[in-house]
Amino acid sequence: MNKPIHAGDCLQVLVGGHWYDARCECYTEVGNLRWYLIAFKPEGEEIFEDFSNLMCRFEPISN
């Protein structure tokens, strides 16, 4: 969507043909930011440290 992703953003990720809710997070390691996604699947959370090949979309936020 040509928008930057920030730590704490809610997304949906396409994993194995299914969309899952996810959250983007980061941490600092030796002065570098390391990004990862936490995907919330029915069978439990899955963490993706290399998610450059995952398709992501922003999750709509309802008020």
Image (cartoon, rainbow, N blue to C red):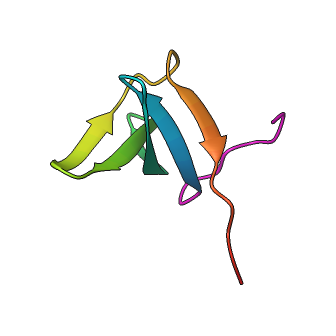
Q: Is residue 50 depicted above or below 26 in this figure?
A: above
Q: Specify the farthest residue to the bottom.
A: 63
x 42%, y 41%: residue: 37
Segment colored magenta: 1-9
Q: Is residue 55 depicted above or below 3 in this figure?
A: above
Magenta residues: mostly which secondary structure?
loop
Q: Which one is in front, 29 or 2?
A: 2
Tell me the quarter of the picture where residue 1 sits. Answer: top right
Q: Where is residue 33 in the image (x, y as percent from the top left)?
A: 50, 37
Q: In this view, does 27 lie to the left or right of 46?
A: right
Quarter placement of the C terminus = bottom right
Indicate yes or no whether the magenta region holds residue 47. Answer: no
Q: Position of residue 17 (x, y in %)?
A: 42, 24
x 36%, y 47%: residue: 38
Q: Which one is in front, 6 or 47?
A: 47
Q: Is residue 32 visible?
A: no
x 25%, y 41%: residue: 46
Q: Where is residue 29 in the image (x, y as percent from the top left)?
A: 37, 37
Q: Specify the farthest residue to the front.
A: 17
Q: Specify the farthest residue to the top.
A: 53
Indicate yes or no whether the magenta region holds residue 4. Answer: yes
Q: In this view, does 6 lie to the left or right of 54?
A: right
x 50%, y 23%: residue: 54
Q: Is residue 37 visible?
A: yes
Q: Which one is in front, 33 or 58?
A: 58
